[in-house]
Amino acid sequence: MATVGMTTVALSALVLGGCAGQDAEPEGGPQEAPADVALDDPVTTELDPAAEVELLEPGSGELEVRTFAPTNDVLPPVTMDFDSTSSVTADGTPQEQHELPRRTATFDQGVESDVNGAQRATLTFSSLAPSAEETGLDELLASAAGFEVTLVREPAGQITSSTLAAPTEARGVARQSVEQMAGALAESGVILPDEPIGEGARWRVTRPNDDAVAPEMALTYTLLEIDGDDLTVAVDGTAAQSSDTLELPAEDGGESVSLDVAQYSSTASGELTFSLTGAAPTDGELKYETTARYRGDSDAVTETSATRELVFRTG
């Protein structure tokens, strides 16, 4: 569940083709999730390499090394809204547009100890619903109830693996939505410095970014408030362009496509509140925006744009 280079993905969809299929819309209305849900065999993705953390300012007041840890307390359910869009135009003419309209998921969270001091943060989806603009998807998305997403993380917050266990009866559109949301959940996890910090602290996290043009994203966190185990941070991130060309893979043994990068911008921004004993942010929002312009051999200009937005809340 590494950060997705949305610009590259959108552009590849134009040049190479291909799109995931969708379930047919059901005729019936919403259905209740069964009490006992049978799950498929879990699928685990290892997340490497580790991010680099640099403390910029320690902050003020009582300085402590802050770490994540399990708790015996009952954790509140978390609700997350998630949507994403991407588009491609060639010389101003729309070519591709992909949209995942807003999905609203509610999940229970739990954290338990794992080996070597790590923790298993588990999010169990109790509901998944479409946006108000969509019709006929309630039953399909409701089949995600019982979906388990488990993130193994180090005490500082670095996530090392992601495991998904889908309900056996989950429909394709539900699986696709949860998989995208699971990737977003992994990305939203805050990694803390291993040095004492207080309110006003600032640190930079440089992590891998799955984008050939910008393979790293630097996120700067500012610790706005500490309330017991609850921390609120402002997030400001940039994925800096490191290549002047984009190489798209060959399809069916043909020649690869090379494009010149005329302009590239990728940013992250938002504010998150999370608990050191929780599995996911409990409040706030995080937004990613990527735009780019490319030129090929014919000097044709291809523009790509992509956004993702996450909104968290409890209660």
Image (cartoon, rainbow, N blue to C red):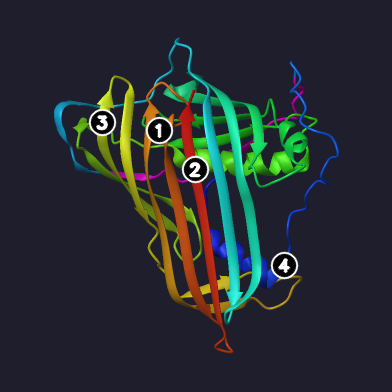
The residue at 46%/57% (across/down) is 289
Q: Identify the element where label 1 is drawn.
A: loop
- Picture coordinates of residue 73, whole percent (x, y): 44, 11
Considering only order in the chain, which callout, 3 or 1, is on the residue closer to the N terminus?
1
- Going from N to C along the chain, the mark reached first, 2 or 4, is 4
Q: Nearer the viewer, mark 2 or mark 4?
A: 2
Q: Which residue is mark 1?
A: 157
Indicate which disc residue 198 carries: none
Q: Nearer the viewer, residue 143 or 257?
A: 143
Q: Identify which amino acid the numbered label 3 is placed on.
A: Glu
Position in image of residue 187 (x %, y %): 47, 43
Q: Position of residue 30 (x, y in %)?
A: 76, 31
User: Could you tell me the amino acid type at mark 1?
Assistant: Gly
Q: Work out how far the residue at label 2 is from the one at label 4, CA to CA, in angstroms.
A: 27 Å
What element does badge 3 sit on? strand
Mark pair 2, 3: CA separation:
21 Å
User: Dot 3: few (<14), some (14–19), or many (≥20) neighbours within 10 Å?
Assistant: some
- Looking at marks 4 and 3 on the same chain, the residue that comes earlier in the sequence is marked by 4
The answer to which quarter of the image holds residue 224 is: top left
The amino acid beneath tag 4 is Gly
Is 122 or 233 nearer to us in this picture? 233
Question: Which label belongs to residue 17?
Answer: 4
Instruction: Tell me what residue is drawn at x 54 percent, y 69 percent.
Output: 304
Q: CA distance from mark 1 to mark 4?
A: 37 Å
Tell me which secondary structure the magenta stretch mostly adopts: loop
Q: Give the residues in magenta.
A: 37-54
Name the residue beneath numbered marker 3. Answer: 225
Image height check: is 73 above or below 21?
above
Depicted 104 relative to depicted 124: above or below? below
Residue extending farthest top: 72
Taking the magenta stretch, the answer to whether it contains residue 184 is no
